Image (spheres, rainbow, N blue to C red):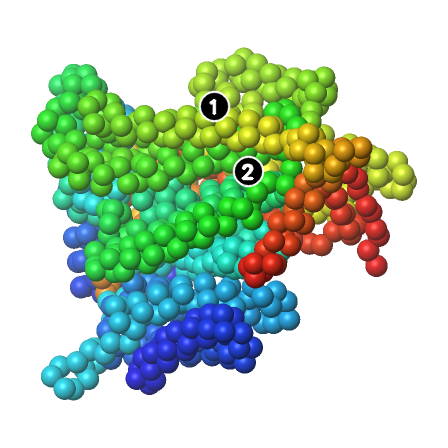
Amino acid sequence: MRRRPRLRNKLALVALLSGVLLTGSVPLQNPRVRSIGELLSCQCGCGASLSSCNMQNCHSAGPLREHLLQMVEAGIGDDQILATFEKEYGKIILRKPPAEGFYLLGWVMPFIGLGGGLALVWFMLQRYMAKRPTTAAAGASAGAGVEPDSPELTRYRERIEKDLSDMDSGRK
Amino acid sequence: MEVLGALAILFAFCLSVYAFLGSIVGIVRKRPYLQKSAERAVLGVFALVTVASGILVFFLTTSDFRLAYVTAHSNRAMPVMYKFASWWGGQEGSLLLWSWLLSVYSAVVVWTNRKRHTGMMPWVIAVLQFTQIFFLILNVFVEPPFHVLAVGRGVQAMQDGQGLNPLLQYWMMAIHPPMLYLGYVGFIVPFAFAMGSLITKQPGDAWIHTTRRWSLITWGFQTTGIILGAGWAYAVLGWGGYWGWDPVENASLLPWITATAFLHSVMMQEKKGMMKVWNMVLISTTYFLCIFGTFLTRSGFVSSVHAFAESSIGTWFLGFLSIGIAATVYLILSRLDYLKSETKLESVLSRESSFLFNNLLLLASAFAVLWGTLFPRISEMITGEKITVGAPFFNKVNVPIGLFLLLLTGVGPLIAWRRSSWESLKRAFRWPAVLMMVTIAALLVAGVHHFYALMSFGLCAFVTTTIAMEFWKGARAIAFRTKTNLVLAAVELTHRNTRRYGGYLVHMGIVLMFVGFTGAAFNQDTTQDVKVGDRLTVGHYDLQILEVTDGSNPNYTWQRATVAAFRDGKALGELMPERRVYVSSQQPTSIVAIRRRLNEDLYLNFAGMSETEAGHAILQVYVNPLVSCIWLGFWVVLLGTIICLVPNKVKLAYARTEMVGVYEKKTTIAE
C-alpha cells in the first residue's frame, strides 16, 4: 500500500528532485559530453568526474555540463574543449596532470621508482649470488694439513663465534 | 554517565602510560613483577576503553541528545543498526573505535603469549602501548567523544539529532569501517613483534612464526573492508563504478599492497633465511601506512569526499609518524648485523627471484598510488597551482604494473626453489602459454581489440591454467594412490598443505577480480529523459518506465521508478531504482537497482523527474560486464585465506636447503 507523504516532506522532495535539472543531467544524454566529462573533474568537492558527479543541486556540475554541451554542439574538437576548460578554470579542472613542465614529474616519477626498484633488485640478486663463503679463509682458519671446511660449516662457525663474542660482551 | 565515559578514557590513558613504562623499566631493570603488572595494565586498558565505548554506544542507541556527538551523528528515526554504526560515523567516535580495537588486540596478544616469548613480550607490549597512548591522547585531549551540549552552566538536550550521513545508511557501510579498522589496527601486532625481535636482537624467525596468522587474518579483514567499500560505492553512489581512486580509498589500498608483499616475502625468510631486512622494512612500512591512511582520512591533508573536516589532528599524526619512523629506522640500521641473509641465491631463474620481482612490482604499485595521492599537494606547494590527479592517471600508471603482477602470479609458483632450467620452465609453461594464446586469438576473432583487455584476459587464462595444473597433478597422484575420486583427492591435497593450496585459491580469486576489472573496458551507459510508459534501449536491453511512485517514512521521503527490463523481447522482470531525501539532513541519496548476473550487470539510477517535460523521468542506465566476478573473486580470496589458516593435516618441515645442500622434506602424520 502506498503511503502519502506529509506536505512538508513532499514539498521538500519536489524541490530537491526538481533540482536534478539544475545539475544538468540532461546534457549527459550527449555521448560526447559524457566522454569528455570523464576527463574533467567536478569542482563541488565530490572528487568525481563531471560525468559522474551525482550530487543533488550541485553548483558546479550543472553549469559546467551546460558549457560543455554548448561547445560540443558548436562542433569544437575534444582537445580544444579541454584547453578551453583549462584556460577558464585552471589546471585543477583536468583529471590528470598535463604532461608538461613540472607536472611531467607526476607522470614519470612512478616509472623512475620502478626503474630504481629494478636496479635495487638487480643489486640484491648480484649480492645474493656473490654471497659464497671463501674456502681459502676456511682453510686458513682450520690450520695446515686439515681439509678445508665446507662453506656451510664455515658459516656456522662464524655464527657461533659471533654469538660467543656477543655473550662475552654481555650483549645477549 | 558521560562523566564515567570520559573518566574511563582518562584512566585508560594513565594505565596505558603505566603499561608502556612498566614494560620497559621491568625488562631493563629486570623486575619481573613490573612486567607482570604492565601485562595486567594492558588488560585494564581494554576493560576501560570497552566501558567508554559501551557508554557511547548506549547514548547513541538511546538517542541521548545531551551529547554533542550523538546530536551530530544520530537521530531518533534511524534504525538501531545505523544508530550503532554512528559510533564510527564521526571523528571522535571513529578514533574511539581505533583505540578500542587496539586495546582488544593488545589484550589478546598479552593473553595468548602469557607464557611465551618472555624476553620479547615486554618490548612488544611497549610498542603496542606506545600506539595506544597516542590514540588515547587523541581521545582524551584532542577529539573527546563525551562533550555535552551546554548553555551557560546547564546541560542542554536537543529534541532530535542531525542523523548519520545518508550515504552511510547502507548495510555495507555499517560494517565497512570496522572491517577496515580491524585491518589497519591489526598490522600493529606483527610490527610490534618485529620491533621486539629487533630490540632483543633475536634474528630468527620467531616473530614471523608467531605473527603469521595475525598477518593473514589482518590481511583478510583489510581485503574485506576494501571490497565492502567498493561494493558500497557501486550500490549507493549511483555513478556505475566501484573505485574512484579517491585519496581515502587509496589510503586503504596502500597498506594492503605492502602487506601483500610482506606475506610473500616472509616465505623467503621462513624457507631460505633471506630478506630479513626487507621483511622488517615491509612490515614497518605497512604499519606506518596504516597510521598514514588514518592521518589522510582525519586531517583533511588532501581533499577527499570521504575525509573528515580539516582539523589540528594532522599535526599530532605527523608528530607520531616522525617519532615512530625515526625510531624504526634507527633500530633496523643498528641491527643490520643480526639481519644478514643465511644463504645465497643460486640462480636468477628461481622462485627466490620471482619473489623479489613480485615485491618490486607490488612496491612500485604502492609508490605510484602514494605519489598520485600526494602529487596534488606537492604540486601546489611548489607551483602554487592546484591540480587534480584522478582515475585517468591512476589507471594509466597502474594497469601495466597490475598486468605484470598477474603474470608473476602464474609464473612464480611454478618455478622451483633454488634453481630452474629453461627446459623445466618450457615444460611447466607449455600448456598455460598455449591456452593464453588461444584465449587471445578467440577474443580477437570475437571482435575484441582493446589491448589491455586482450592482455588481461590472456594472462587470466595463463594463471588459471597454471593453478588448475597444480591441483590436477597433486590430486591425480593422491587419487591414484588412495583410489578416490579427483574432487576428494583435491580436498585431501589442500588439507595436506593448506598454506600452498589456500594460496593458490587466493591467486584464483585475484584472477577473478582481474576478469571483473577488465570488464570495465566494455561498459556501456546512457542518461535519458524518458516519458513514463515509453521505452529506451541500452546495449541489448529494452527498458520501459512503468510508473513513478512516492512515499515517506519517519527517516526519509522517497520517489521510486518501476522499470520493466526486456532482452530480445523477453521480459526479465522489474527494477525499482529509488531516490531518497532524508528528513533530518534534507540530503538526497540514490538507491540504485541492479540486475546482477555473472556475465553482466544492468544498473539503473533514477535521477528524478524532469521539470521541463511533464511526466518524464531521468534515468541513468549502465551495462557493466563481468562486475560480479569481482565480488565472486573476493569470496574465493576469503576462502583461500581461511584455508591458509587451517593447520596442515600433514606437518611439513622443510629443512633449509643451504644447510644440507639438497632439498629435504620430513613428513609426519599428525595425530
Who's the residue at 19% across and 16% down the image? A77
Residue under label 2, please give it.
B510
Residue under label 1, please give it.
B453
Q: Could you classify mark 2 by the number of other residues whose Cα lies within 10 Å: few (under 14), some (14-19), or many (20 or more)?
A: many
Q: Can I make out residue A61 in this image?
A: no
Q: Quadrant of the N terminus of chain B?
A: bottom left
Tell me if B415 is positioned left or right of B480 in this view. Answer: left
Who's the residue at 64% across and 54% down the image? A164
Q: Secondary structure at mark 2?
A: helix
User: Where does residue B409 sit, x and y in percent of width and height?
Assistant: 58, 32
Q: In the rendered structure, are the residues bearing label 1 and label 2 in contact, judged by CB atoms less than 8 Å apart?
A: no
The amino acid type, in three-letter code, at marker 2 is: Ile
Who's the residue at 18% across and 58% down the image? A12
The quadrant where residue B48 appears? bottom left
Q: Which mark is residue A93?
A: none
**In the image, residue B32 above or below residue B573:** below
Kindly give the residue lying farthest to the left in the view shown: A88
- Give the mark, 1 or 2, whose residue is nearer the N terminus: 1
| Viewer-proximal residue among B504 and B615 | B504
Q: Secondary structure at mark 1?
A: helix
Tell me if A51 is positioned left or right of B434 in this view. Answer: left
**In the image, residue B579 above or below residue B2:** above
